[in-house]
């Protein structure tokens, strides 16, 4: 896949994931099922940051984009699993669980976009630090 097409598809994934997470947050606030807490406040800030990153996506270098996707995806996934996915299996779906499950899928999509470039960069960095192999030496 050409680099420009890959970047556009990653931007689409990032933007859709951010929109899904923000839609879930709006659903949560409108449903008034939980009191506003520090965790929800942090999630609202995180959603706003994600939308800002989505708008600036083309201007951000590839590795920082990947790192931001992971830094947003991990806590979103944890929160959605903890507050929506697992409780849905335990007690059935609640008022905001469907949008929470969609947000969990969005978090996984962010990890799919973010983790491979970071792993590649770490791998390449480790190979560069090892230096070239010399015949007869491990």
Image (cartoon, grey):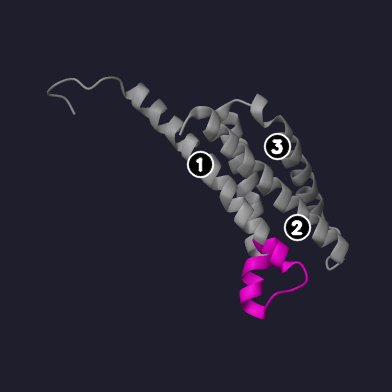
Q: Quadrant of the C terminus?
A: top left
* Residue matched to label 1: 115
- Along the polypeptide, which appears first: circle 2 or circle 3? 2
Residue 18, image x, y percentages: 70, 46
- Does 44 sit above or below residue 55? below
Q: Are the residues tagged 1 and 2 within 8 Å (C-beta)? A: no
- Residue 106: x and y, percent? 63, 52
Overall secondary structure of the magenta section: helix
Q: Do labels 2 and 3 touch, CB within 8 Å?
A: no
Give the label, 1 or 2, closer to the camera: 2
Q: Earlier in the sequence, mark 1 or mark 2?
A: 2
Q: How many marks?
A: 3
Across and down, in percent, residue 108 comes to 57, 52
Residue annotated with mark 3: 54
Q: Residue furthest bottom?
A: 91
C-alpha separation, residue under disc 1 versus residue under disc 3 = 17 Å
Circle 2 residues within 10 Å: few <14, some 14–19, many ≥20: many
Residue position marked by numbered label 2 in the rendering: 24
Separation of marks 2 and 3 at Cα, in angstroms: 17 Å
Instruction: Give the magenta range.
Output: 83-101
Residue 95: in magenta span:
yes
């Amino acid at each position: 896949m050409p680099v420009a097409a890959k970047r556009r598809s990653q931007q689409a994934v990032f933007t859709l994931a951010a929109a899904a997470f923000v839609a879930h947050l709006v659903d949560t606030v409108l449903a008034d099922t939980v009191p506003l807490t520090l965790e929800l406040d942090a999630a609202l800030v995180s959603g706003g940051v994600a939308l800002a990153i989505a708008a600036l996506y083309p201007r951000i270098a590839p590795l920082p984009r990947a790192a931001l996707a992971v830094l947003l995806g991990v806590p979103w996934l944890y929160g959605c699993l903890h507050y929506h996915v697992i409780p849905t299996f335990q007690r059935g779906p609640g008022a905001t669980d469907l949008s929470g499950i969609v947000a969990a899928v969005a978090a996984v999509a962010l990890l799919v976009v973010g983790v491979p470039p970071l792993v590649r960069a770490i791998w390449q960095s480790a190979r560069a630090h090892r230096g070239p192999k010399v015949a007869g030496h491990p």
